[in-house]
Image (cartoon, grey):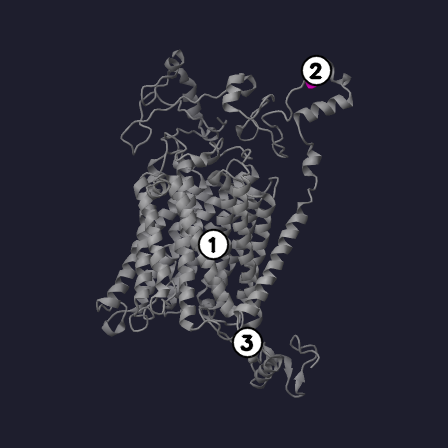
Amino acid sequence: MRWKRWLMANSHKDVGTMYFIVGMWSGLGGLSLSWMMRLELSRPGMWLPSTEMYNWIVTLHAIMMIFFFVMPVLIGGFGNWLLPLLLGGIDMSFPRVNALSFWLVPFALYMVVVSPFIEQGSGTGWTMYPPLSSTPYQGDICTDMVILGLHLSGVSSTAGAINYLVTFLNMRGKSYKAEFCPPFVWALAVTSFLLMMSLPVLAGGLTMLILDRHFNCTFFDPSGGGDPVLFQHLFWFFGHPEVYVLILPGFGLVSHMLVFYTKKIRVFGAVAMMYAMISIGILGFIVWGHHMFTVGLDADTRFYFTAVTMLIAVPTGVKVFGWIATIFGSFLSFEAPMLWVIGFILKFTVGGITGIILSNASLDVALHDTYYVVAHFHYVLSMGAVFTIFGSYVHYFSLLTGNVFHRSWARGHFVLTFVGVNLTFFPQHFLGLSGMPRRIPDYPVFYYYWNQWSTVGCAMILCSVSLFLHMQLEAFLSSRRPLMVGNRPSSLEWVVMRGFPCMRRHTFVECLAIRRMYKVTNRRKKFMATVDPEEVEYASGFVVSEAKKI
Amino acid sequence: MSGQLILRRLGNKIRWQQVRSCTAVVNLKQVQTYPMEQTSQEIKDKYYPMTGERDIVGHGLANEGLYVDDYEWPCSGVRFKANTPEILALREKESNNDWGKLTLEDKKDLYRASYAQTFEEMLAPTGEWKRQLIIFLFGCFTTQLLIWAQEDLILPAPSAQLSEGHMEAIVQNMINQRKGIMYGLASRYDYSKGEYKPGMQPKGSADK
């Protein structure tokens, strides 16, 4: 039966497709919530029936976008689809664990989405700081639903991360050295490492929060000797690596798209790009304090977190310059994915620059919890991670579905989205610098002008997403097949493009032995010259010369 | 397959387990690469079913036996057109005789048989920007419709504080309170004369 095929699916492609579907559904849900926020903020005065409702909308928007849109699509969707293909492997190392980590996501999503319909809805924000999330202020079950939903999502991500790491280490040929692995493989490896190291800390913090809420503990309650700031430390020890979890797979995909459309063999400074990702991953663990500059950290600590945060600009700069250098010298054709990549580089850099400003502890005192922060992280996420998702989806659509997007619609979709997101989030810099606090449903009339523009931008994003849905429908209905892949394949996912790879559950029936010729050392070449290819003995005793006789 | 990838290991003679996580040792299939110029019809039909009667003349992009116009990688895997007696005669003339004996028309015919476009034609403007512009303007139009709809159908009527008189009163109140005396609004106001400094009126209040 057809439904059984999906229910029982454990092929990496099927699981990846299901991740895409759930992720995109959540993305549309998160977008709808953001529209409700913009409607509320389009004018001074209240439109929503209560401020609590605005709070749960903010909470749900963040959680759905982070945990149920960007992570499932980038890591679950693209990761599942591409990792075995890029490694020349058959499937993920643990296909059933893979299926488990997917099937936990809908249940986690259900718990989070249902939470607003129980009592007043959880208005804690995705950070869930106590005492706001403690029983005197958010005593309803809805907050517990959100916490348990995040727990489930965390279990799913941890299982997935273990699977990705083991696949990366184990499911490639012996000759396929790690340093020759494509950027997306490395991005997934670093991402999985970050998830595995940080999620248990979040799980601990959330469990302590549940114990505080329901079992009379006082981990975060000063009246019993606890400290609310402890939760912030626990949360942001997870939260900051989480930021890199969201963007690193996008980094990898951007490198792939750039290599493809500039027709180069590898991204510029491929090894440096790889080490930059590793550096970002390591540094990501020691900068969490910059989210907490205003909680009363001492001056030395703030200085330390400022310095280390600024240090992250170095590997990030390496990546940005690596991408620019990859573009340099190529004959640019502005295909839709390339437009997304260029948009990503431009806007992610803007977000990075505002990040440098926010990393400064003394400036952050003024800008903390203002719309400047909102503008900053939407530039790196809404224009960083989401641009990479759109770009990669358009780029890999032929691989995923066997169809091709309409070229003009795809490019028009980019232009509309690009204008829309900039119109939405650029004015928020001005609002933040003028002192408008975030997470509020109403504001004085001084902030009316730029909020209006922001709402116009949100409406434009809604139109562009509608266009995106139309594009998908059009692509499926018109059944435009990819004639060919327009590049020499320097990474494995395109090597098997002939026919319909999307229809096969497994592209490779056995692990490929791969050697990249341009990296073969002289010593190896000399050794190879002494080998008679006809007499090579393979694992099963298969000898070429004997096979020819047959 | 490609020059960069060799799908069989020509390595050491020791037996080695390909997939370390599996208990079963997998078989490596023999993957043979064919010099495409010398492929038989059987091989062509098997691996390049879409080429038809066209000559395979090289690796092309992605090692696919397909034609594509590409400015950077102009050598396609196959010729643009299938062979006809006329073209074959021209090729015979090209290969056996002095190229100087080929007329300009012959040269053009030979080129067009192998390639669809010249470099000039590849770089010629397509006019697609007009379509992009139409899509963008259509998006702007639907955005405007959506904004009208949300203002008229979803949102309540604007509150009185958004009226012009109320806004002016707020600005006047800010001036009275001397808000922004260093760099802000009050710094633009000349309190001795009771009016804005020359050219310092806030936008929209220049005529007042």
CA–CA distance in space, label 2 to label 3: 82 Å
User: Compared to A472, does A383 lie above or below?
Assistant: below
Residue with the mark numbered 1:
A313
Q: Residue at x 53, y 50 (%)?
A: A468
Left or right, A100 with reference to B115: left
Question: Upstream in the sequence, badge 1 or badge 3?
Answer: 1
Residue with the mark numbered 2:
B89
Q: Are marks 1 and 3 on the same chain?
A: yes
Give SS at disc 3.
helix
Which kind of residue does numbered mark 1 sit on? Ala
Mark closer to the observer (2, 3) = 2
Give SS at disc 2.
helix
CA–CA distance in space, label 1 to label 3: 37 Å
Left or right, A457 with reference to A220: right
Residue B92 within the magenta-colored segment of the rendering: yes
Which image quadrant for residue A261?
top right
Mark closer to the observer (1, 3) = 3
Residue with the mark numbered 3:
A445
Q: Are marks 1 and 2 on the same chain?
A: no
Q: Are marks 1 and 2 in contact (CB under 8 Å)?
A: no
CA–CA distance in space, label 1 to label 2: 65 Å
